[in-house]
Image (cartoon, rainbow, N blue to C red):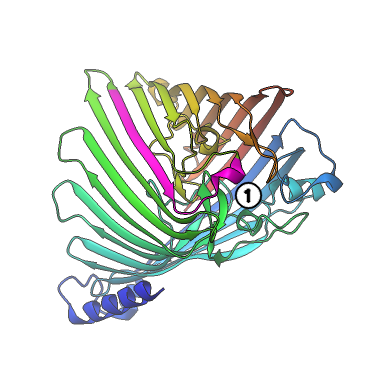
Amino acid sequence: MKLAKLSLAAIVVAGLASSSFAASETLADAFKNGKVSGELKAWYFDRDTGVETTLDQYTAANVGKQGDADIFVTGVMLGYVTDSFYGLSLGATFQSSYSPFADDESKQMYGGDMYGSGAVLSEAYVAYTLGKTTAKVGRQFISTPLVSGSGSRMIKESFEGALLINTDLPQTTLAAGYVSKFQGRTTRAIDDTLVGSESDIPDFTKSAVFYGVGVASFDGAYTILAINKSITNLTITGQYAFVSDVGGTAFGDTDVWVGGLGYIVPMSNFKIGLDGGYQASKTDSYNAAANADIGYDGGMFGLQASLIDLAGFGLKTAYTSVSSDDNVILGMGNGAGGAVAFTAPLIAGANKVSTADTDAFKIEASYNFTNVGVAGLKLMANYISVSADGTVTGSTGSKVIRPTDWTFWAGQISYDIPAVKGLTVSLEYEDFKQEPDGQATTDGDELRFRANYKF
């Protein structure tokens, strides 16, 4: 954490030396003029994996992956940011989660993502802005293509470290960051040795979720990012991340990088979107022989074409493909991978399309009912076909490659209720079919209902 400490010292010194941009004239005013924001949440999830397993059959390897269970969770997110005082500001965000009716089946099924009662200080940072440069040090939410915390569960993932953002160059955003710790969704989400009801509110640890690998320890992560919009309607994105000692000697030093292009073609009554990207990873010491000769030095490319806002209608078609010999690590945090993994299922996530020798296709349709006088009501449906020919199954020492086909049907409806500003309700449903080569077909589904009130 030496880098973060040095950065903090530099921020404090610079703040004391400058007085050209004080928004508040006194420190007391900075706190008085600060802003409070918050969100109240009530969520209900129901998951059927298609394979019934009794409680005494659960192990660390299959917990949360087999069975049929539901859970109701309530939560609060409360944040506060001071006003600027000589360029300095402070921020903090608390998150809480409570599952009042969770039974043994619910705790088993959702211990890795939703079950874990309590509160956590997810953000606690000092920020300093000078001109068009902002530095932020401490616990914070980060959202970049390769380092990104997901907010699709009750507790949003967070990071501890330092982030520097600069916008001096025209139409360009540059960023550099260091991450020392990670806060997952629950304790079991970052400790897969926990079983049964052994799940609690998470804390910041030296283990993180690496999309494509799972949970692994690490010894610091560094990243640089550039986003350029100099050419009209074209967005160019590039990011590189280096993570030290992923899983100790299991993976070793790991490099991940991504490049993407997004172009919007304006038409008279609608827009056409064209997106493409390539992402790759390379590990230092992964033992591919113990994993059926499948390693993590793979690459993924993705293409997507979109029809945008045609009288409220939208349409997307996308294709992704992964190299034949290796899986690809999509980044740190469950929010990573979105820059290329255009075919990721709505609920199952991008891990279904990031394994070796995988080809996936998606078609998606949406409609915004604002066009017919119902403001805030949106509908989406999609179909995804995945051919994962490099899927590895079996335990250590007996792993084999078993080609597997997946089919996903999903729908989502959300409504920003006009009568109560800040209140949104949404419903998601996804049905899947898993067809492993030479084994029985599995059918399952998941439903998610969310009610959120932001203030």
| Label 1: which secondary element | loop
Q: Residues within 10 Å of mark 1 (few under 14, many from 20)?
A: many
At x 65% / y 34%, what residue is drawn? Answer: 400
Indicate the position of residue 413 as horizontal and vertical percent values: 53, 29
In the image, residue 164 above or below residue 371: below
Q: Is residue 157 visible?
A: yes
At x 36% / y 77%, what residue is drawn? Answer: 5
| Residue 142 found in image quarter | bottom left
Indicate the position of residue 363 as horizontal and vertical percent values: 46, 20
- Residue 274 highlighted magenta (yes or no): yes
From the viewer's perspective, tell me whether residue 64 is left or right of residue 224. right
Which residue has dot 1 on it?
113
From the viewer's perspective, tell me whether residue 279 is left or right of residue 439. left
Indicate the position of residue 91 as horizontal and vertical percent values: 40, 67
| Residue 289 found in image quarter | top right
Image quarter (top left, top right, bottom left or bottom right) of the N terminus: bottom left
Indicate the position of residue 118 as horizontal and vertical percent values: 65, 63
Q: Give the magenta range.
A: 272-291
From the viewer's perspective, tell me whether residue 217 is left or right of residue 50. left
